[in-house]
Image (cartoon, rainbow, N blue to C red):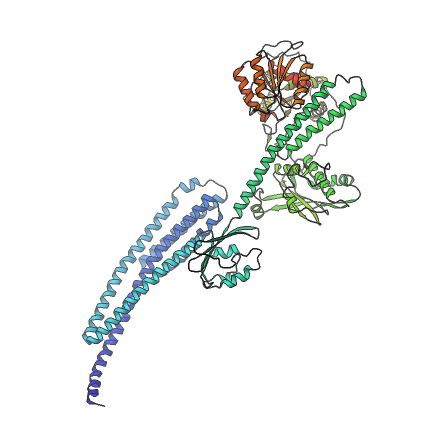
Amino acid sequence: MTPTNRILLLALVPLLISLGVIGGFSVYYTQAWREKQDFVIHTYRAIRTAEALLTDMLDAETGQRGYLLTGRPAYLAPYQGASKRAAEDFALLTELTEDNPRQQKRTAELQSLMHKRFDLLEQAIRLHDSNREISTFITSGSGKAVMDEIRRIVGEITSEEEALLSVRSQSARDLEQRTTTVTLIGSALAIIFLLGSSALLLRSNVRLTRTEKTLAQKATLLQATLDSIRDGIAAFDAQGRLRAFNTRFFSLLEFPGELAHEGAALANFQDIDRHRNHPILGELPAGGQGEEAYQRIAIDHRELDVYRNALNDGGFLVACLDVTQRVRADAIIRQAQKMEAIGHLTGGIAHDFNNLLQIISANLDLLATDVQGSPRASGRLQNAISGVERGSRLTQQLLAFARRQPLDPRPLNLGRLLQEMTELLRRTLGERYDVEAVIAGGLWNTLIDPVQVENAILNLAINARDAMKDGGKLTIEVSNAVLDDAYAAEHEEVSPGQYVMLAVSDTGEGMPQDVMARVFEPFFTTKPEGRGTGLGLSQVYGFVKQSGGHIKIYSEIGHGTTVKLYLPRARRGQEAIQKPTLAPVEGGTETILVVEDDAGVRAAATDLLKELGYSVLKAENADEALALIDSGARPDLLFTDVVMPGDMNTRDFARRAQILCPNLLVLFTSGYTQNAIVHNGRLDDDVFLLSKPYRREELARKVRGILDTAKREVEAPAPAAPIVLPPSTPQQPTDGRKFRILVVEDEFLVRMSTVDMLESLGHEVKEADSGASALDALRADREFDVVVTDLGLGDMAGAELVALMRKEYPSLRIVIASGYDSTGANAEIDGEAVFLSKPFQLADIRAALEAAMGV
C-alpha cells in the first residue's frame, strides 16, 4: 500500500465516519420526513374522499330524478351505484378521520343525514311506483334541507383537513430544512450529493404522486361515467385486449362475468359469440375513427341495438342498448293504427251494406201492398224481409270487434256453463270429433256476459272443427290462472291479477306465424270461399278485450292450436241465468209511459204497445213525463229512450219518476252503447235495456217479462183519458198533405227506391245525384219544402251541403238519410235536421217527414 493510499485511506476513515454519521442522521431525518409526507397524503385522501362522498349523494339524486321523470328502470342503476359508492366512501372517510375526535363527531352526524336523505329518495321512488301523487312530497323541500346540511358538514370536514394539510406541509418543509442543514455541516460533497439525490427523489415522488392522483381521478371519473349510462360499453385495443367496460355490457350481451377484467382477450369473447344466431363482435371493423357498424339482435325476448365503432389506434368500441320497450311500444302503436284503419274500413263497408239493404228493404216495403191476399207471395216476401234482417245483423258483426256492443256481465262459473254446453257441442260437431271438458277444482267465478261467452265457445269450437278435416279431439279446459307482473311486462295490454282461463285446444293442422299475426282481423279467414265470413275470432277478440280480459293463441304446424281466454275473476257468487223464453208473444192491460223525443219512433212504439193491448201514455221528453206522473198518472212501466234532449240525465229522470211512483218499473231503449246506462261497454247493474232496432216480438217479450218477473201485485189504474200534449209548433192534418221534396243521393238504386216511396205517399219529388246538382235545383226552384240527403256524396260531404243549404235557405227543412248511426251523423250536422237511419221503411220516412215539417 502506498503512502498516498494510506493517507487516502486514513482520510477516508473520518470521512466515512462523517458520512456514516451524516447518513445516519439523513436516514433518521428522511424517515421522519416521509412520515410527515404520509400525513400530508393522508390529509389529501381525507379531503378527496369527503368531496367524492358529496358527489355520490348528488349522483344518487340525479339517478332518482331521472327515474321519477321518465319512469325508466334504467335510471335506477346509477342511483343504486351511487348509493353503494356513498357507503364505501363514508367508511373510508371514517377510517381516515378516526384519529380526530372532532371529525369523528362530524362523520357520525353525516351518517345520520345520509341515511335520512336516502330514505327520502327511496320514499319518492315507492310513491312513484305505486302511482301515488308525489308532487307535494317533492316540493316539500325536506330533501333539499337535508342536502344543505350534508354540504355544510362536508364543508366543515374539508376545511379542517385543509387546515391540517397546511400545518403538516409546513412541518414537512421544516424537517427538510433541518436535514439539509445537518447534511451541510458534515461534508460539502456528501451534502451536495445527498441534497441532490434528495431533491431528485423528492421531485420524482411529487411528480409520481401528482401523476398517480391525476390518473386515479381520470380512471374513477371514466368508470363512474361508464357505470352511469344505460348503454353497455366495452373498448378493445389493437391487440384485442379489453381496456375499458361497464357491467351493463356483460349483462345485456350475456357474456360471463369471468371475462369482466382489464386485459381479457377478444378471442374469448368471439368464441362465445360464434354460438349466437347473430354474432355481435365479429371481426375488427375496417376504417378509421368514427366508422360505425350497426345491427339489431334478439336475445331472450329482448331487442338490442349494437354499435361497433373503429378507433384511430387500431382498436374498436362496442356499445349496446336495450330497446325492447321502444320496439314493443312501436309495435303496439302500429297495431293500434292498423286496428283504427280497419275500423274506418269496416264503417265504410257497413255503410255500403246499409245502402244495399235500404234498396231491398224499400222495394219490399213498396211491394207489401201488392202481394196482399197471396199467401205464397207473402211467404216469399217474409223470407226476403228475414234476409234483410240477417244483413242488418251482419253490419253489427262488422262493428263488434270495435268493442262497442253493450255487455251484461254477471258472476258466472264457467265450469257449470261448460258442463251444460258439452253435449250441445258434441251434437254440433258430429261423431268424428271427440269432445272432452276438463274443469279444475276450486274454480273461481268470472264477471262475464253469459250469452257472449257461450257464443265465443261455440265460435272457437266450430273453428277447431274446421281445422280437423279428418276428425280429431277437441279439449275445452277451464282453470284458475294468475298473470304476474313479468307476463304483464311482456304484454302491454295485460293487467296483472287473477283470471279464469278458458282454453280450447284441437288436434288440427295448426297455423303458421303469418296467419297467427292476422287471425283476429275482421274478414281474415283461411277457409275456402263461401265457408266463413272471417268475423268469428274478431268477435271473440273484441268481446274478451271489452270484458277486461286477455286472449292468446298457441299453435304448431301439424300438432294443433290452443286458444286461451283469460277472463277477470269475480268475487261474488253466481247469479241465476234466465234462459230466453220461447213462449208465444203476449200482451197485457197495464199502463205504459213511452218517453221518446223522436216523433216517428214514439208513434211506432205507441202503436205496437196499443196493438198488444196496453194502455199507453206518451211524452216527448223527461220534463213532460214527470209532469204527467206528478199530475196523477200512475203507469206500471216507464219505457224511455236513453238519449234525449235536455239537461236531465236519463238515470236521474228514471230515479225521480220512481220516487213519484214507487212501484214503477223502467225499461230503457237505445241505439247507442256509450251513454248514461252503458259504461265501458258494460250495462249497469239492475238495468233493463232493449236495443234498437227491435221487432214487435222482442218488445212484447221484453215488456211482458219485466212485468211478470216483478213478483208483486199492481192494481191497474183506471184508463186514463187521452192526454193532449201542447205542441211545440202549430200542427196541421197529415191526411192529403202534399210536400215538394228534393232527394239528394249519389247511389242510383237508393235514390230510385226513395223517390218511389215518397211518391207512393203522394208527394211531389225531384232528385239530384250530387251536392252541386242539388244546389242548382234549389236555386232554380225555391218552392221545395224538404230536402232528403245522404251524408256520403261524391262531390262533397253531406255536412257541407247541409251547411250551405242552411245558410242560403234558412226555412228549408232537412232530413239526413245515412247508413251511419246517428252518433256519427250528429257530430257532423246541426241539431235542426232530422236523422233517418238506413235501411228505412215507408213508415220510417213518413215519420221523418212529419218530424221535419212539425206535423
Specify the quadrant that holds the N terminus. bottom left
Residue 812 in view here: no
**Residue 651, quarter of the rendered image:** top right
Position of residue 719 relative to residue 679, above or below, is: above
Q: Residue at x 56, y 42 (%)?
A: 332
Q: Residue at x 70, y 17 (%)?
A: 610
Position of residue 537 relative to residue 223, above or below, is: above
Q: Residue at x 21, y 76 (%)?
A: 189
Residue 643 coordinates in the image, percent (x, y): 59, 24
Residue placed most toward the observer, 209 or 468:
468
Residue 596 coordinates in the image, percent (x, y): 62, 20
Question: In this image, 830 relative to 172: left or right?
Answer: right
Specify the quadrant that holds the C terminus. top right
Residue furthest to the bottom in view is 1
**Residue 359, quarter of the rendered image:** top right
Residue 45 coordinates in the image, percent (x, y): 34, 60
Position of residue 243 relative to residue 228, above or below, is: below
Position of residue 167 relative to residue 558, above or below, is: below
Residue 289 in view here: yes
Residue 297 coordinates in the image, percent (x, y): 55, 52
Marks counted in the figure total 0
